[in-house]
Image (cartoon, grey):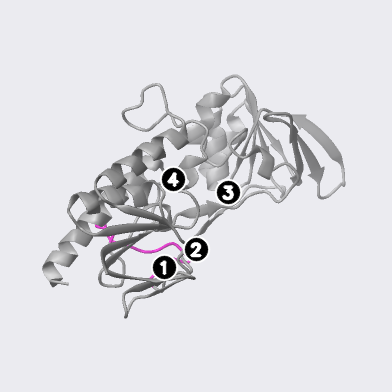
Amino acid sequence: MYDVVIIGGGPAGLSAGIYAARARLKTVILERLMPGGQAAVTDYIENYPGYPEGVPGHELVAKMQEQAEKFGCQILSNEVEAVTIEKKTAATRSENYNWKALIVATGADPRTLDVPGCADFKGRGISFCATCDGALFSDRKVAVVGGGDSAVKEAIYLTKFASHVFVIHRRDKLRAERIIQEKAFKNEKITFVWDSIVTAIKGDQRVEEIHIHNVKTGGEKDVDVDGIFVYIGRMPNTAMINVEKDKAGYIVTDSDMRTSAKGVFAAGDCRSKEHRQVATAVGDGASAAMSAEEYIAENGD
């Protein structure tokens, strides 16, 4: 029996682990892959407080892991397949983990491009966060794939750094809010590539070129770019638990990270919220752990 079981070892889960273990709660983090989540594969993070020169993602999360383990938090490589709230169990293939309080910090996976080269260049020119990585492409050409709010907002943001931004969209009009579109259309550093999809990503050690297919004319062309920012949606990893979620599948919480189920909390990118950054995930994790501690104390579990 654990006081706190945390599902997911990204920044939110590691932060929750630090706070819960430091409160002398018996705590375990169950992570399906390696600790760190998306942050671990981010080439460089320049907007995390305390690192004015920036920090490689893997180094930042390694420090978080070290700190969690220092306070006695266990970190196990095990994928949770189902949560039974009534029995307070988190089930993996090999074992059931019982808890007094549960923190879900399973994150959300960006939808990626299913094209040749995509898997090869993740973290080496392919990014899913302009705020995190935009400054790495100063005076370089980049592409943004997508046509919704996130894609167009990030394209505008990238013009602060990049010499030029190509927005590649499979339709002939954007889905973003009108006011955002207007800003983008006025920006001389943005070129829209309509009715088009990326069919291949090429390069040596890093991204150097993308192949584009026009879905209406059948035309093909190569475009030289140093980076690709993909905004075609995200998929929250929340299928294993039955709590209130929004229409996109993100877990609904209050400001203290409480979910619709007593003793169950959610933190980080898996919960329904506006902003998803490493710093906000860490804050969520701290709040969730403190709320879990209060819940255990009040309920005498």
Place of residue 184 in the rendered image (x, y in percent of width and height, measured from the top left): 58, 35
- Secondary structure, mark 4, is loop
Q: Earlier in the sequence, mark 4 or mark 1?
A: 4
Amino acid at circle 4: Gly
Q: Residues within 10 Å of mark 1 (few under 14, many from 20)?
A: some
Q: Main secondary structure of the magenta part?
A: loop
Q: Nearer the observer, disc 3 or disc 2? A: 2
- Secondary structure, mark 2, is loop
The mark found on residue 248 in the picture is 2
Q: Nearer the observer, disc 3 or disc 4? A: 4
Foreground residue, 143 or 35? 35
- Secondary structure, mark 3, is loop
Residue 263 in view here: yes
Amino acid at circle 2: Ala
Mark 3 = which residue? 148
Kindly identify the residue that appears in the image at 79 percent across and 38 percent down. 211
